[in-house]
Image (cartoon, rainbow, N blue to C red):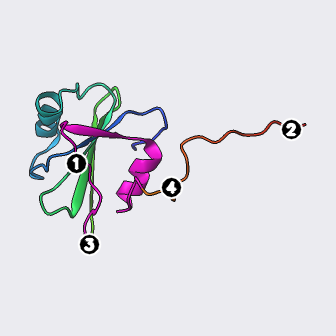
Amino acid sequence: MIQLAPQMRILVAVERVDFRKGIDSLARVCAAGLGTDPFSGAVFVFRNRRETAIKLLAYDGQGFWLAQKRLSRGRFRWWPTSATAAATLEAHQLQRLIMAGDPAAADAAPMWRRVPLPA
């Protein structure tokens, strides 16, 4: 199971990926295309050409996890557009993206909230 923690590094590939690729091919995309070690423990997020599916690739110290979500209707409307090959997200933003939402929306909960100490 992939556990999303606030400390995780999450990289979203800006370019679309051929979804016939498996773990080894996506790991090569991480190394060559994104310039990041696929064994680093980061979570890598890819989308297909039609914007109807995403894949997550993560290494947990023993092996790779590959998860895929394909929407039954609609598309993943939000995706980063930048000059670099990858954009970063925080864990709560990735959860929103997985649910086909906009991780950059203003109504998302902040990453961290101060908890007041009892008096």
Give the number of the disc on residue 74.
3
Q: Nearer the viewer, residue 27 or 35?
A: 35
**Extent of the magenta region:** 75-104
Distance, label 1 to label 4, CA atoms, is 20 Å
Q: Are marks 1 and 4 in contact (CB under 8 Å)?
A: no
Question: Per the image, is 78 magenta?
Answer: yes
Dot 4 amino acid type: Ala
Q: Is residue 45 above or below residue 33?
A: below
Residue assigned mark 1: 81
Q: Earlier in the sequence, mark 2 or mark 1?
A: 1
Distance, label 4 to label 3, CA atoms, is 21 Å
The picture places residue 114, in percent across and down from the top left corner, at: 68, 39
Dot 2 amino acid type: Pro
Q: Nearer the viewer, mark 1 or mark 3?
A: 1
Distance, label 1 to label 3, CA atoms, is 20 Å
Distance, label 2 to label 1, CA atoms, is 44 Å
Q: Earlier in the sequence, mark 4 or mark 3?
A: 3
Dot 1 amino acid type: Thr
Magenta span: helix, strand or loop, mainly?
A: loop
Circle 2 packing at 10 Å, graded few (<14), some (14-19), many (20+), is few
The picture places residue 49, in percent across and down from the top left corner, at: 12, 58
Dot 3 amino acid type: Gly
Q: Earlier in the sequence, mark 1 or mark 4?
A: 1
Q: Secondary structure at mark 4?
A: loop
Distance, label 2 to label 4, CA atoms, is 27 Å
Give the number of the disc on residue 27.
none
Residue assigned mark 2: 118
